């Protein structure tokens, strides 16, 4: 009996040892940020605006609030990775531990810095959080691609919007694209080998433009049945953590906008790739790949008050869409994209000024519009079927000087 007890004690000791030696978590991310206030609509446009889900590639978190509201004492809550610890930066530059529910001063669009330290204490990541007043704008705006830099890892380019009147239309004030996802498939690629890159002095007016190119994703892409990546630029969210699992759902388009867009204009030129291939990488004869450019205007809240955001699955079919403008393409009788060898988009290898009108299928409610109950999505892609991982490697779409024009009779004041 004593021997059995002795052996059982040894077993318990080994079990405890195994438990104690379990490696601690190395992740140090903010997964979501929320504020809890009694009357959210007095500060935000929608109740769901009190919560920000943070993408794995994002370190700048921006809440948009009504222009007249004071945010000097907001109770803030962070959802962070398991075992990690959050710290907030004090006025003297030091960091002290942050407790959820603590009141934070975001007055004057003050930027508050937070540092998240992993459970094993070996890794940390710094985030900025700010509450920006959503001042009224005239509606019309023009954006180019002059403001770009390498991402924090130095691997690929990203583009910012420095005009405060336009930045709110872009999540975190940045264009989104598939470059972070391409890094997963071709980690050895140099910055200028990614699908979306700047071309210095390449624009029609000699300014910097952007080149979107359909790229081979290499052996890793073949393994996961994602053999090509379309170059892209859009406003919205790209969830790189979900890119391999569901690329269409990981790409979400649009941001709230308080004006009714009537047309998109841009300077474009296009060079087609040689061979169209299906998702399995097989060449498809008689098909010419095409670029894409579109603007979508949609209701961003459903009948139950839940947030609506279109993604790669329903960017043209979501029932909440009220207006759509797209580069001309052939379509089947049911309205779906028609793959063919006679494209009608009209783009060539020479720069062209292109106008894309927005066609409305539903009336726009001015009250809802004034409260940013609609969202505007803008998107460009080198392969119009790139979301389904088919197209022609080598397709190149060049884009510059993008403008949105709005209905002058529906300008809104907050």
Image (tube, rainbow, N blue to C red):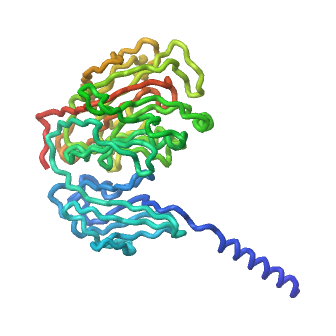
Q: Position of residue 251 (x, y in %)?
A: 43, 41
Name, please, the residue furthest toward the bottom: 2
Front residue (pair 151, 223): 151
**Residue 334 visible in the shown view:** no
Name the residue rendered at 50%, 25% in the picture.
Answer: 393
346 in relation to 108, above or below: above
Q: Position of residue 313 (x, y in %)?
A: 44, 35
Front residue (pair 179, 242): 179
Quadrant of res 160: top left
Q: Is residue 22 left or right of residue 313?
A: right
272 in relation to 370, above or below: above
Name the residue rendered at 35%, 62% in the picture.
Answer: 34
Name the residue rendered at 27%, 53% in the picture.
Answer: 46
Name the residue rendered at 78%, 77% in the picture.
Answer: 11
Q: Position of residue 303 (x, y in %)?
A: 32, 46
**Residue 223 visible in the shown view:** yes
Q: Position of residue 136 (x, y in %)?
A: 15, 47
Front residue (pair 370, 93): 93
């Amino acid at each position: 009996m004593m021997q059995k007890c002795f052996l059982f004690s040894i077993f318990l000791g080994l079990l405890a040892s195994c438990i104690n030696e379990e490696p601690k978590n190395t992740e140090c991310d903010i997964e979501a940020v929320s504020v809890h206030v009694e009357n959210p609509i007095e500060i935000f446009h929608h109740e769901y605006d009190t919560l920000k889900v943070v993408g794995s590639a994002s370190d700048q978190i921006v809440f948009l609030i009504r222009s007249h509201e004071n945010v000097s004492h907001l109770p803030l809550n962070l959802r962070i990775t398991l075992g990690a610890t959050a710290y907030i930066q004090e006025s003297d530059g030091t960091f002290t531990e942050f407790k959820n529910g603590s009141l934070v001063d975001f007055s004057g669009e003050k930027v508050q810095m937070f540092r998240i330290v992993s459970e094993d204490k070996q890794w940390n990541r710094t985030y900025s959080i700010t509450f920006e007043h959503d001042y009224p704008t005239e509606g019309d705006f023009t954006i180019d691609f002059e403001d770009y830099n390498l991402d924090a890892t130095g691997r690929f380019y990203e583009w910012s919007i420095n005009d405060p009147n336009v930045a709110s239309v872009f999540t975190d004030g940045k264009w989104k694209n598939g470059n972070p996802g391409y890094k997963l498939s071709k980690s050895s690629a140099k910055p200028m080998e990614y699908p979306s890159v700047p071309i210095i002095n390449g624009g029609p007016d000699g300014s910097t433009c952007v080149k979107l190119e359909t790229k081979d994703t290499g052996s890793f892409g073949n393994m996961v049945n994602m053999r090509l990546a379309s170059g892209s630029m859009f406003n919205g969210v790209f969830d790189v953590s979900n890119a391999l699992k569901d690329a269409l759902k990981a790409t979400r388009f649009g941001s709230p906008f308080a004006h009714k867009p009537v047309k998109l204009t841009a300077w474009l030129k296009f060079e087609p790739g040689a061979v169209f291939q299906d998702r399995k990488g097989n060449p498809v004869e008689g098909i010419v790949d095409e670029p894409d450019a579109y603007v979508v205007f949609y209701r961003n809240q459903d009948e139950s008050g839940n947030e609506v955001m279109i993604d790669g699955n329903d960017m043209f079919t979501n029932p909440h869409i009220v207006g759509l403008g797209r580069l001309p393409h052939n379509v089947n009788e049911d309205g779906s994209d028609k793959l063919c060898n006679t494209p009608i988009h009209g783009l060539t290898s020479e720069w062209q000024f292109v106008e894309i009108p927005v066609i409305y299928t539903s009336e726009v409610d001015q009250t809802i519009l004034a409260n940013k109950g609609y969202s505007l999505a803008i998107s460009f892609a080198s392969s119009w079927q790139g979301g389904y991982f088919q197209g022609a490697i080598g397709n190149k779409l060049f884009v510059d000087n993008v403008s949105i024009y709005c209905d002058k009779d529906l300008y809104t004041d907050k």
